[in-house]
Amino acid sequence: MQNRRRFVYPFTALLGQEKMKKALLLNAVNPRLGGVLIRGEKGTAKSTAVRSMAALLPEVPVIAGCPYQCDPFQPGKLCINCKAKYNGELPPFIWRRVQVIDLPVSATEDRVVGSLDFEYAVKHGGRRFEPGLLARANRGVLYVDEVNLLDDHLVDLLLDAAALGVNFVEREGISYSHPAEFILVGTMNPEEGELRPQLIDRFGLCVQIEGETDPTMRVEIIKRREAFDQDPLGFLGKWSEEEEKVRQEIMTARHLLAEVTMTPELEELVTQICTEALVAGHRADLVMVACARTLAAFYGRKEVSESDLHEAAEYVLPHRTREPSPPLQEPEPPEPGEPDEPEETEDEQEQEQQQQQPPEMQENAQEEQDQSPQKAPPQGVPEIVFAVGEPFPVRRISYKVKGILRRGSGRRSRGQTATKSGRYVRSTRRWERQDLAFDATLRAAAPYQKRRRRDGVAVVIELDDLREKVREKRVGNFLLFVVDASGSMGAQQRMVEAKGAILSLLLDAYQKRDRVGMVAFRGEEAEVILPPTNSVERAQKLLEELPTGGRTPLSAGLMKSYEVARAHLYKDPDIRPLLIIISDGKANVSLGEERPLAEAIRAAEMIRDEERFKSLVVDVENSGFLSLGLAQQLAEAMGAEYYKLDDLKADRLVEAVHDVLEA
C-alpha cells in the first residue's frame, strides 16, 4: 500500500495573526530567544501555525542513527555516543526535515527528560540511558499545547533545557547530558488558568491572539482551507514561491545575525523601557536586546534601530510588565438630598433598636423575634449594588496534604498523587501494578543476585523486590464563598468591605489556580451565582454586580453551600472544600416552620458533621459594646474558625485559612 504523505498547510497562506507569525519566525532565525508563549482562545490557528512554520524551515543534516539528531558539522555539540564513535571523523549523515515534537499534558518526567534503560539493565547487567522527548526535539520544535496545565516542575525542566541548550539528567543512579537545542512553543487559554509569574518570565516572547472579526477575512479563511483540503498538492504548489521566499529570508537572517550591532545609546534606551515597565530582574533587558538584533537581521540590516527596540518591546514586555494594582472605582458621592446609606427596611430598624438596648434586653428581643411568625418581605425594597472595596495583599497559603491521594493539578498545595504524573519523591513496598520504581526494585534485588543466578538473565527480580513510586505534585483547592447579600449588609458600608475581602482572596486564588465558587443569600432564598470554576475573572465580575437588599435567609445560604460542596466532592472526591461564610450572622427567614436562628444553627451543625468539609466564618458586624455576636455563635455550631472583618484586613484570615486547610 502506498504511504500517504501528511500535508501541512503553508505558512504564508495563513491569514491574520501577524504578531504570532512574526514571533515564530524570529525564533526560527534565533532559537536562543527562549521560545514563544501564545495566549488566546481556541480555533485561532495556533497549532497550524507551529507546524507550518516547521515545514517552512530548510532541511537539516543529522548523523544517521543518532537519537539526538546531532549536527555532523558541529563537533563541539555532539552527544557522548557520537563523540566516542567517530572521534573527530566526519560521520555519515542524512538530510531531514525539522521535526515538531508534541509534549502531552499527561507526560511524566521520565518521558520528557529520559531515564535508565531497565530492559537493557536486566538483560545485560549494565546501565544505558534511554532518551526522552527532549532528545527527539533537539534541533527541532517542541510544541506544548495547554502549557498552563502542565505540572510546574516539568515546565521548569523544559525552560531550563531551552535556555541552556543541554538536558542534564541526574536520576536513578545515572548522570547524563545531551544537546537539547529546540524552539519552544507553548500555547494556552487564559480562561483555564495561568502560569506562575516565574514561569511566564522564562518564555522569551509572548503574543496575545484573538479570532478574526472581519467578515471578509473570515470568508477568505474558509475558502483557502477548503481549497487546501480538496487539492493539497495544488494548493502547496500555488504558495510554493512565497514559501521559498520566506525560507530564504530566514536563512539570510541567520547568517546576518552574528554581524548585527547595537549602539550604547540604544542599550540605555532598553534599560529605560524595561525600568518604566516595572519588570522584575534583568531577563527582559537581555531578551529585548536579542529580539531587537534578530529583528534587524530579519529586515536585512546590520545595525539595530530604535524602531526595532519598540517592536521588540511588544513581544518581550507584555507578559513581564508588573503594573500596580489599578484603583478600583470608588462609590459615587450621593446626589444632593439623597441619604449616604441605603434606606433601612423595617426589619433593619428593629435590629438597630435592639443594638441601642442593654445586652440582656438584646437577647430577649432576639428570642422574641425568632419566636414570632415570619414576616412577609417588604414590597418595593430597593436593591443596591455596592462598589468593591480596595483589595489588600494576602500571604501565601501553603499546606501539605498528608495521607490523601490527589488527582488534580494546581499551585497552592502539595500532596501525593495516585496517577503517574508528578515528581517521583520516594518508593514504597506497596505493589499495585501501577507505577513500578525500577531503581528501588533493582536496589532491593541486588544483594541476592549470587544465589539467584539463572542462565541468560543478568538480574533476577522476585515479587518481594518490587517497589512502587510515590509521586507528589502541587494541587489546587476549592474555595466556596458564601456571601450574605441581605439589606443589613448595606449598613455602615459592610458590603463594600466584604466585597474587598472576597476580592483579595479571589486574587490569591487566581495566583494559586484554585477553583472557586460563590453562593449568595438574600430575600427569601440562596442561589449559586458562580458554579465551581477556575475563572477568577468571572467571579470578580459577578462580585462587582452582586446586589444587596432584602431579608436574611441564612439557613438557605448554608444549605445551598452544603449542596454545592457535596456535589463537587462527587466529581472530585480527593479535594476537600473550604466554605468561607461572610456574614453578620443575623437570620430572619426560615426554610420551614423552625425559628430562623435555630434553623441556621442546625444547618451549621450539619456542615460540622461532614468531616470532608472545612469552614471559616468572617464576621462583618462592626465591633462595639452592643455587638450581638451571632456570627461567633454560628462559627461555634459549625466548628469553624472565627474571624472579624478587621482581622481579615490585618492578614490574619489567610493564616486562619492556612490552619484550616492544614488541619
Image (tube, rainbow, N blue to C red):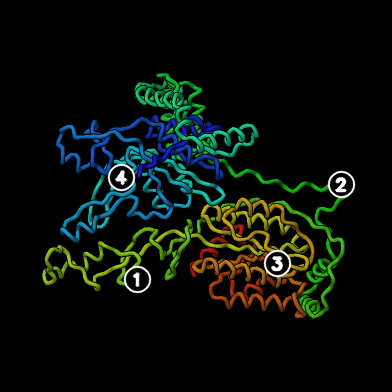
- Image point (78%, 55%), residue name: 384
Q: Earlier in the sequence, mark 3 or mark 2?
A: 2
**Which quadrant, please, contains the N terminus?**
top left
Q: Is residue 204 visible?
A: no
Real-space CA distance between mark 3 and mark 1, rounded to the nearest whole angstrom: 50 Å
Q: Which residue is mark 1?
A: 432
Q: Earlier in the sequence, mark 3 or mark 4?
A: 4
Q: Earlier in the sequence, mark 1 or mark 4?
A: 4
Q: Is residue 192 visible?
A: yes
Q: Secondary structure at mark 1?
A: loop
90 w.r.t. 659: above or below: above
Q: Which residue is mark 3?
A: 584
The type of residue carrying mark 1 is: Glu
Q: Secondary structure at mark 3?
A: loop
The type of residue carrying mark 4 is: Ala
Report the mark closest to the observer, 2 or 4: 4
Q: State yes or no: discs 3 and 2 in contact (Cβ < 8 Å).
A: no
Q: Secondary structure at mark 4?
A: helix
Q: Earlier in the sequence, mark 2 or mark 1?
A: 2
Q: Which residue is mark 4?
A: 135
